[in-house]
């Protein structure tokens, strides 16, 4: 039997993945199961057979209908033993986990201890998983941020104001970088690039003199510098300024077409792989191709943003 669960932060695209999981499992004569509430639910035995009717009408929904969690209890062996016993009750020996690094590390340990096959599907708005160019949900999140920045520009330009907009991303500046570039922001502050307030001041003061009537600054939460940039705009640039933390709306929203399609691909490849072999791997999308990597290859290194993208955004940091 095969089961799917989510773990860690939710991301849009999880529901299309869950729908594909059920439909494709039945196509392949497998009985699909849901594990509700992530690793917490696995420990608590919150497991249920999944039917087509469970996934009818969920394609357009953000979040995850089987919910997710961050579990500290899973660190304890006795809880993992309980989790395994729960899976055995339903003869589940194949698992698909939609999650991030932390979840994959936990599953890696679990699969080495017990007779379980597992494929991890990189799913996080942060797009910070090593070995893959894309994580499920990042496209929807970027579109939520794009819409927010477009709206903020409307009010910002009407009032001769600067806006400092903080994006999520945990330790990674990817969301801020892509959003700043594609929204035409004036400033982008990310942890991957050292910024230079003196040259930013020179450039922007000149632009203000030449008639610039608003400023958009996109700041990654990973820098912790949102307030600093706001104060600097106020005192050094002498420009009226407002701050906005986009927060958890970045994790919501109807999954984009791209996230839906990628969810289908991730899931069908993963089920095919689980049917072939006993595996303990992560499916990644690298250089426009799907492939499988060992968990170690993914979790032992930190994700690095493509140099070409970093080069493109440099001019917004100085
Ligand atoms: O990993 C996804 C993410 O949304 C990060 O971007 C953010 O730092 C964190 O999760 C927020 O976590 P929580 O939902 O627990 O507040």
Image (tube, rainbow, N blue to C red):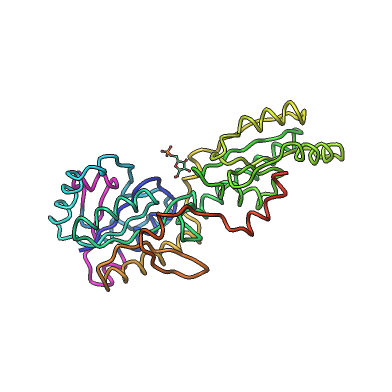
Q: In which quarter of the image is ligand 1?
A: top left
Q: In what quadrant of the picture does the N terminus appear? A: bottom left
Coordinates of residue 314 in the picture (x, y in percent): 69, 50
Percent x, y of residue 36: 27, 48
Please name the residue shown 33% across and 42% down the image.
Answer: 70
Q: Which of 291 and 1 is in front in this view?
A: 291
Which residue: 30% across, 62% down?
280
* Nearer-the-camera pick, 298 or 240: 298
Residue 32 shown in magenta: yes
Counting every numbered tag in the picture gives 0
**In the picture provided, is 163 more to the left or to the right than 27?**
right
The residue positioned 43% from the left and 63% from the top of the image is 284
Indicate yes or no whether the magenta region holds residue 41: yes
Q: In this view, does 259 lie to the left or right of 238?
A: left
Q: Residue at x 36, y 64 (%)?
A: 267
On screen, residue 210 versus residue 78, left or right, reads: right
Instruction: In this rendered view, identify the residue nearer to me: 295 or 247.
Output: 295
Determine whether, in the image, residue 273 is placed left or right of residue 212: left
- Residues shaded magenta: 23-47
Which quarter of the image is occupied by the C terminus?
top right
Instruction: Work out whether residue 311 or residue 259 is closer to the camera in this orientation and state it.
Output: 311
How far across and how far down the image is residue 227, in percent? 61, 30
Residue 242: x and y, percent? 66, 30
């Amino acid at each position: 039997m095969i089961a799917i669960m989510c773990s860690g932060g939710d991301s849009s695209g999880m529901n299309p993945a869950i729908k594909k999981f059920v439909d494709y499992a039945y196509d392949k004569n497998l009985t699909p199961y849901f594990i509700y509430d992530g690793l917490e639910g696995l420990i608590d035995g919150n497991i249920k057979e999944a039917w087509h009717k469970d996934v009818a009408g969920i394609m357009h929904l953000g979040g995850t209908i089987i919910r997710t969690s961050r579990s500290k209890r899973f660190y304890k062996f006795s809880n993992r033993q309980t989790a395994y016993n729960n899976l055995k009750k339903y003869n589940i020996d194949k698992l698909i986990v939609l999650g991030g690094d932390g979840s994959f590390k936990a599953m890696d340990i679990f699969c080495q201890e017990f007779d379980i096959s597992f494929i991890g599907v990189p799913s996080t708005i942060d797009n910070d998983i090593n070995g893959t160019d894309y994580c499920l949900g990042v496209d929807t999140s970027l579109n939520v941020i794009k819409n927010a920045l477009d709206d903020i520009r409307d009010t910002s330009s009407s009032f001769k104001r600067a806006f400092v907009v903080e994006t999520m991303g945990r330790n990674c500046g990817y969301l801020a970088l892509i959003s700043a570039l594609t929204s035409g922001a004036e400033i982008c502050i990310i942890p991957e690039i050292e910024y230079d307030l003196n040259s930013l001041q020179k450039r922007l003061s000149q632009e203000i003199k030449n008639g610039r009537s608003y400023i958009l600054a996109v700041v990654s939460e990973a820098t912790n510098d949102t307030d600093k940039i706001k104060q600097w705009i106020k005192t050094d640039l002498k420009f009226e300024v407002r701050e906005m933390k986009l927060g958890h709306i970045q994790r919501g929203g109807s999954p984009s077409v791209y996230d839906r399609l990628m969810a289908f691909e991730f899931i069908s490849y993963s089920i095919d792989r689980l049917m072939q072999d006993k595996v303990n791997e992560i499916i990644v999308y690298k250089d426009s191709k799907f492939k499988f990597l060992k968990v170690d290859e993914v979790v032992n290194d930190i994700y690095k943003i493509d140099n070409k993208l970093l080069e493109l955004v440099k001019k917004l940091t100085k």
